[in-house]
Amino acid sequence: PKSQILLIFLVVLYLQSGLGCNRVPGSPYLCSKFPPSEVFLVNDSSLSSVDQLTYQTFQGVLARTQPRTMRFRPGQDNWLIDNLQQNSQQLNISLNSTFQNDYFQLLHLFRTEFDGYALYNINDVNQINAVISLCSAVNVIAVNISQEETIKKATSLPLYLNLAELNWTVNDVYENFPSNFSTCGFSFQEPSMYEYLADYAVFGRMITDYGEPANENVSAMLATQLPNCPVFGWSSENIFVGNMSERGLFVHASDWAMGLSFLTNLDEANLNQNTETLAEYNVPKTEQTEEKIEKSDNISQTICFLVSDGDNIQWLLNGFATSPNAFGSTYRGIVPIGWTLSSALSELAPSVMRYFYNNASKNSETGALMDLFVDAPSGLGYTYPDLFPSADFPTFVNLSATFNNKADLQGLVNVIGNPIVPLTEDMDVYLSNPAFRAVFYYNYNHYFASYDQFPPYFVNQKDGLRKLVMGSRYYLWEGCDPTLGNNCEDDGEPVVSYNPQTLAQVLEQSAADQSTFGGYSLVAVNVWNYGPEDVVNTVNLLKSSSLNYRIVDPVTFVDLITKNVKT
């Protein structure tokens, strides 16, 4: 029975947990027996594509005992390596570049920790995930047939299994090692993406598979997973997330992730956003509003911008930090901006989360925090609450609340589901948890809805508190632009695309009393199309309008609505 399997897994999890591992109760994320100490860097540009897979399986197996190595991309990963070096004393690590351009010497150095190598053929897509899964099950490294002699010379390791000869699939590997795999962690990775994620899959003893979730073989592998556990990787978004949701699982978009087996083992205690520096009203001062800023009565629209896709783990580890359209923008700090951020990062890559918090911008005049993070969809991971098994959903929400608190995400959570209006029972589960203060809900197809379609509302609690459920009223998003005369229809519902010019126009016409929901606008910002510069451009356009507005962070936004709106 699954209850016995869960008990066995929790015992294994306990035995695998090291003394330096900072995990919340019930965490689905494993850690090494011992925390990292000396870490050997490997230059990614020195590795061929098949070397990248060999290296990842080597990295993942080592990390089960203690993380010993990490690869990096010169230039692209400078921010990450610099952050590790600057905080090496706090993290109790030292970075060693001795073998950065010759990982074969590194293989030789740690050869005694492996039982052999598994041979596979990179040109057979069925063998790629099979060999990664085999390395998850046993202490071996993956070696392509073209590299066999080189690896044997470097390591003197024996051949453990020849998948190229056996033509094993993932299912064959599982049938031969069924008790060696995790029942709380799955890698759903396309074989062509073998340069990424494999180190964490091997470290976590995960099955790695890919295909249609309804496929009999893939479905059989997914059926090994317990409820409320993560699925790493990616596929066609709505179908993939929907299927995982129906299974009671949640998704971490991570198909381009590198080095998680190392990053997850860096301990960062007391992650804080420094929200004590929040101003009550973070308003860009203009000649029009400066005299009226003190009195809430004179404000006719309160606006909060919230950037999308913070649930995307691989994006957070890669381009997010440096992209001029995201956290690398020089336009941060001009107006308050809300960012969605995965609370799971507090255990998957806590040093990366610390980097974002430490580098959040502040207003140059007031010192007020201008970048504020809230929990990304739909809590601990991306899932659709309307499809999640009702018996398992409260556990997911409770675990999400624990992680929200650990990550200091202010009790605010962005949720994505399929209905335009969220199911009342799902919102009740979120907001009945003391840790959650508000839900920002988006419909998957449209990400925004007019107040006629989805009116914001409060959920009244037994202790008298009111907790907010609100969708995005507008968004910055490329697509169908009605101002060009296009017929913006999608599945029978109007889809409106806003750029800074058209968004400023509709906001200018949205003046309303601050005692009503109409006086508040949550604006979703699609990070793949728009960023801080576009937010600033929108605000600059509003300066010349007749609208008496204020721009606030998500916490202030929720506080103002809760305080002022009469229902």
Image (cartoon, rainbow, N blue to C red):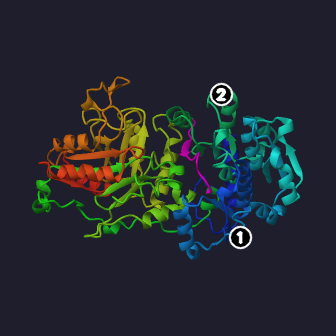
Percent of width and height locating residue 412:
38, 53
Q: Is residue 428 visible?
A: yes
Q: Residue at x 43, y 64 (%)?
A: 357
Label 1 crowding class (10 Å Cα cut-off): few <14, some 14-19, many 20+?
Answer: few
Q: Which mark is residue 171?
A: none
Percent of width and height locating residue 145:
82, 44
Q: Nearer the viewer, residue 381 or 306?
A: 306
Q: Nearer the viewer, residue 535 or 555?
A: 535
Compared with 418, 378 (above or below) is below
Q: Residue at x 38, y 57 (%)?
A: 329
* Left or right of 5 in this view: 24: left
According to the picture, the residue beneath numbered tag 1 turns out to be: 98
Span colored in magenta: 247-259
| Label pair 1/2, CB-CB below 8 angstroms | no
According to the picture, the residue beneath numbered tag 2 turns out to be: 215
Which quadrant, please, contains the N terminus?
top right
How much space separates mark 1 and mark 2, taking CA atoms?
46 Å
Q: Nearer the viewer, residue 26 or 77?
A: 77
Label 2 crowding class (10 Å Cα cut-off): few <14, some 14-19, many 20+?
Answer: few
> In the rendered structure, which disc, 1 or 2, sits on the residue that comes first in sequence?
1
Q: Is residue 344 visible?
A: no
Amino acid on which disc 2 is placed: Asn
Q: Nearer the viewer, residue 92 or 397?
A: 92
Compared with 302, 34 (above or below) is below
* Left or right of 387 in this view: 564: left
Disc 1 is placed on an element classified as loop
Q: Residue at x 51, y 50 (%)?
A: 315
Dividing the picture into quadrants, the one containing residue 517 is: top left
Disc 2 is placed on an element classified as loop
Q: Main secondary structure of the magenta part?
A: loop
Dividing the picture into quadrants, the one containing residue 235 is: top right
